[in-house]
Image: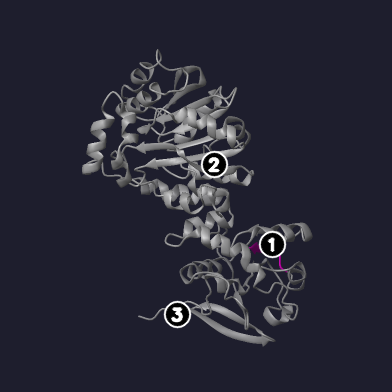
Amino acid sequence: MGLGMGVTVIIPTYNRSDLLERTLLCLRHQEADKSLFEVIVCDDGSSDDTQKVACSFESYLDLRYCYQTDLGFRAGTARNMGLHLAKHEICVYLDTGVLIGADLIRNIIDFHSRYKGTVGLGTVHGMNQKDDQHPIARYLQSIALSEHPEACLRNPMLKTYPDSRQMRFDFYENDLDRSSAPWSFFWTSMVSVETRILRDVGGFDESFQGWGHEDLELGYRLWKAGVHFRADPSLRALHLPHEQFNPVQMTSRKNHLHFVRLHQELPVELSYVNETLNYEMLLAQFNVADQYLPQDYDYIEPSDIDSNQEGRRLAVGYMSSPFIDRLSITDVFACNQQNAELIRTERPAVHTDYKAGFVNFCEDDYYHMALITDVWKVIPLTLLIVLLDELLRIAKQVYLLDTTGLSLEMLPIVGEQLPTGFNAEPIRRIGKTGVYDITRLAMTT
């Protein structure tokens, strides 16, 4: 066990005193010495007996109770209260109603002793199970209501209550740095991070209101700060299913869009528009596709596309600085981080974002012209529809480049045709590259 390391357990809660009691009982039964961990219950404005239940454990645990006025669902703000008060080197966030084994605190300390600067992610059984009347749920709840709810973690029935992330944990052999989006696993049902790191990145963003995505947003900032992500089989928990106060989808989608607004970058916008495809795989493809696609288009001149160079001119995809100069591009959406950083360095006057443009917050016709390079060939058809629709909204004119003879066989997703609903009017062909004017097809009744 790591010398000199301790754990602060932070539990946000709201009107769930019965579930809170189950979680606190598990903490009472920890094998680790009481001096090695503290518990901070962060009450998001409860009106039930939450305070009484929490404080009833003060003689068994190093426990503090803090309260904030009920101004709606503010889990991130509640968790930040705990972060502000934390006295130990490691913070563990636990949701109310999450049951943990008696060895969790000891295993958390062992994990962070071995892996410095690393987010610790465990298996949380039952994360996809919402039906509290399911026969297995009712069976586990009968154990959870006992004096030793941690016994649930030893029950073989947990196999029927998988964590939806487990397959990915296994695929990456727990080294989530191998994933293109390790932050997407950052669920605060149970997650551990060094306290110093959490404070360095500013904790949770308190602008989130309602359920969802304040945890992923923090995970994203941790990832961008260079923090590592790792799963560990010794970190296990059970999330007891319970009824929801309000339909969570109502605020989840709103908060997801807020996440995109805060971080207008490809990984985040792709998570928003990509509901059925594996966006880790898509991100990996975007990161390597620049090796297979042209970037300079040195044979194309402004007159080949749009001789009127007024207003803002946007280019989307992969491109070189000479190409940007030649076409008087003012704004770039670069589809991988390396390309974006190179352009920012070489052409600081050009407004460059690491994104594709699936989601934008500018007004209609903000750009005089938008040009999408051959990158469209490595975008799945369903997402290409979203992209073209959005470019046609934000730009007065949209052009597309189509270069023949590209060797894209090594990429998992390759498209060679535009989706229905759009018209591609050929303007001219320069060498192997055709220039097309993109418009929506007129709707017929």
Residue 148: x and y in percent read 31, 25
Which residue range is magenta in the image?
Answer: 329-335
Taking the spot 63% from the left edge, 61% from the top edge, the residue there is: 336
Q: Amino acid at mark 1?
A: Asn
Residue 355: x and y in percent read 60, 60
Which residue has dot 1 on it? 339
Question: Is residue 2 in sight in this rendering?
Answer: yes
Q: Earlier along the polypeptide chain: callout 2 or callout 3?
A: 2
Can you tell which of label 2 and label 3 is closer to the viewer?
Answer: 2
Q: Earlier along the polypeptide chain: callout 2 or callout 1?
A: 2
Image quarter (top left, top right, bottom left or bottom right) of the N terminus: top right
Question: Is residue 210 in sight in this rendering?
Answer: no
Q: Residues within 10 Å of mark 2 (few under 14, many from 20)?
A: many
Q: Residues within 10 Å of mark 3 (few under 14, many from 20)?
A: few
Q: In the rendered structure, does residue 331 fall within the stretch colored magenta?
A: yes
Q: Which mark is residue 235?
A: none
Residue 387: x and y in percent read 53, 67
Which residue has dot 2 on it? 218
Q: Amino acid at mark 3?
A: Ala
Q: CA distance from mark 2 to mark 3?
A: 43 Å
